[in-house]
Amino acid sequence: MDYYFQEFLTSEQTEARRRVLVVDDTPEMRTALTRVLQKAGFLVEVSGFGAEAVQQALISVPDLILLHISMPDLDGWQATRHIAILPALQGVPIVIISGEEQPVDDPYVRTFGAHSLLQKPVQDDVLIAHLLAAMVSRKGRKNDAAPEAAAPVESAPPEPAVQIPEPVLRAEEPPKKKPIHENRILVVDDSGLFRKRIIHALREIGCELIEAVDGKQACRYVGRYAPDLVIMDINMPGMSGLEAARHIRDTYDSDDLVIIALTGNTQLEDVARAMKAGMDDYIIKPFANHELLERVRFHLSV
């Protein structure tokens, strides 16, 4: 395993956030996923049925649930909805695995409370990168609104009670939650072509958009414009996205400002570096517009 990835998984910050519950009714798939996750350093629990998974999750409260969409009792959507409304499990990201026929931008993903959907076949390193990003993206977001209540799962136990070279200057008052069209997004990439592509895609949701060409400018613009979300390339000349993220995190935490890493490198050490630098999510170039929009909508809660 790559050194940076191992260091990320075993650091004090993430030690309690590396247990995954794998839910699939196919023994072969459970075994395959377990091997991949254990090789990457995760602790793995398994379940073969949706209703059983709900009860098991209530007992163990995993750091992430990896759930197959098709199962004989509760399917992936039904199980997700049950899990998402339980107070003890709010904030636990749920990643759905689907077949080739299921679109990755299925509107049910967010409606039912899942973090995202992965379409088979998926490469091992992409799977690990996606799960890490899902874990970190939900850090500190346990108070997100839950979906409407579904019918209780039969035989389920009662719900447990849930008792920069230049400094970044914080705005006098942090921005309040606002409608999507009032949100401000900072796009940081040294490639003008990629900035234009990202901005073109984001115009669909009507946010105010700001551009920066490198990490140093990004740090200045965070202090000047107080964006709600930053989409930032990791590898840039001068001050990299990783260094800029560390400077920004000296002043703003994830509740104040979301940072999405953008990179063309799928190596696992890049994921580890991004998360350690304080980034909240991870998108791999090249990406589909719907993937970018889904991640932005998720983080802005729209």
Image (spheres, helix red, strand yellow):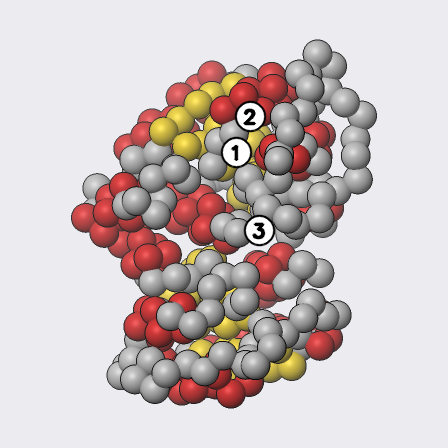
Kindly identify the amino acid type of the residue bearing the numbered disc 1: Ile
Kindly identify the amino acid type of the residue bearing the numbered disc 2: Ala
Q: Rounded to the nearest whole Å, what is the CA distance between mark 3 and mark 2? A: 18 Å
Q: Is residue 240 visible?
A: yes
* Quadrant of the rendered image containing residue 89: top right
Q: Which residue is mark 3?
A: 141
**Residue 245 versus residue 109: which sits nearer the camera?**
245
Name the spot of residue 145 as percent of width and height, x first: 71, 48
Name the spot of residue 191 as percent of width and height, x first: 40, 82
Mark closer to the observer (3, 2)? 3
Q: Examine the rendered structure and indicate whether residue 139 appears above or below residue 23.
A: below
Task: Classify residue 136 as left or right of residue 277.
Answer: right
Name the secondary structure under disc 2: helix
Disc nearer the start of the sequence (2/1)? 2
Q: Examine the rendered structure and indicate whether residue 54 appears above or below residue 166.
A: above
Q: Quadrant of the N terminus?
A: top left
Task: Classify residue 242 as left or right of residue 100.
Answer: left
Kindly identify the amino acid type of the residue bearing the numbered disc 3: Arg
Whether tag 2 and tag 1 are in contact, CB under 8 A, the answer is yes
Q: Which residue is mark 2?
A: 57
Q: Residue at x 79, y 31 (%)?
A: 150
Q: Which residue is mark 1?
A: 65
